[in-house]
Amino acid sequence: MISRQELEELAQREETPQSFVLSVYLDTDQSKAVNVERAFEVELKNMLREVEQPLDKHKREEFQEDANRVLGFLKDYREPARGLVIFCDQSADLFWWRELRALVRNGVWWRSSPYLRPLLEILDENERYGVVLTDRQQARLFTVYLGEIEEHHEAFAEADVKRIKGPGQEHAWAQLKIQHKAEEHAHWHLKHVAEMVSRLERIHEFDRLILAGTSEATGELSGLLPKALRSRIVRTIRLPVHAKESEVLEETLKIEEEVERTREAELVENLITAARKREQAVLGLDETLLALQEWRIWQLVYADGLARSGAMCTNCGALQAKKNEPCAYCDKDVRLVDDLVELAASRVVEMPGKVEQVRGPAARRLDEVGSIGALLRF
């Protein structure tokens, strides 16, 4: 798992123009035919070759040191997950890697700082989910993040709910008494489940919650959860309490995709409305970069695939879309940068703020008004 602190440390790493960082994003998904027989190693070598070709002799030697370190690691890398992210700078003794059970698009960059934009986009696309699977007798708790599912067995609960015999086997008054007792036990069980969910959230800090199981149990559980947790419920579904982990994961990922697209569409509409009313929101690259320079951004929002080059001041570090003019803030020289969005996203993480890449219909809607914008702190 990748923590927020790790991201901030990577984003805050000081740029070293004399010592570049090799950033590698590699699709290692073994379910894909293109990755059979570790073909991803060949793909990486091809990408490295493309980056190396335009370098001069001195830079090429530095690059080869980083590339050889990565290739050596990959040679011994067994049982790959769906994706792999590596940041390597041999001269600075940096070698950071994480495997992800989420979609990773192939890419290689060699530059003065770790290239974080693809990683930020992966993390944005995959929020942490809590899943409660329960009936009126048993419960199982899971967390799902970056395509991985973990069942928290220590939280498994089973209430002593008595089974009621059919008519004729008990006197009516006895049946009612036993039924009432069973209802008490079931209520106690679900109240205990609600307490366990609260405890799980405090430990794992999940963003959204799914209630699964029988409709009777999930309906009652919803009413027993604290208000803060009820607000995070995104879906209630029917699922057997003994469902396989793979089934729970499959259903969660389907819901995650639907919820993410819906949430992005709402976010973009709220952003556009707020910006037009001048209510702590801006649209367009220039306005967004101005808000970034003033450290006013609470949430950066941009469309999938947005590519904008520009310039960064060599003195104060300000970002600007104009490449051929001195810094608008200190009048010093600027240097060209190929991805303003990545630099802006990294700085928002440092603030700290939130970064949101939107896809599908939400991205097309945002493209109509400049492809990028931000919700502001003030």
Image: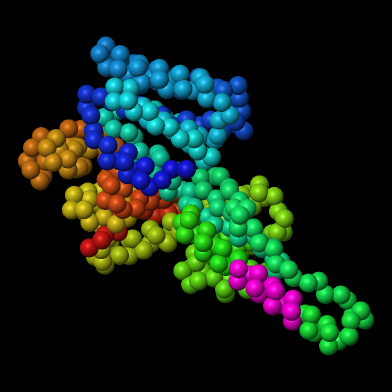
The tally of labels here is 0
Residue displayed at 43% across by 43% down: 2
Task: Tell me where residue 242 appears, x and y as whole percent.
Answer: 72, 55
Q: Residue furthest top?
A: 57
Task: Tell me where residue 222 appears, x and y as whole percent.
Answer: 58, 71
Q: Does the magenta portion include 185? A: yes
Residue displayed at 52% across by 25% down: 77
Tell whether 86 sits left or right of 152: left
Task: Tell me where residue 330 appears, x and y as whole percent.
Answer: 7, 43
Name the main secondary structure of what is drawn in magenta.
helix
**Colour scheme of the picture:** rainbow
**Residue 356 seen in render:** yes
Task: Tell me where residue 114 appears, x and y as whole percent.
Answer: 32, 33
The part of the chain drawn in magenta is 180-192
Q: Residue furthest right?
A: 168
Q: Which image quarter holds the C terminus?
A: bottom left
Residue displayed at 18% across by 49% down: 293
Relative to residue 115, is residue 66 depicted above or below? above
Residue displayed at 27% across by 17% down: 59
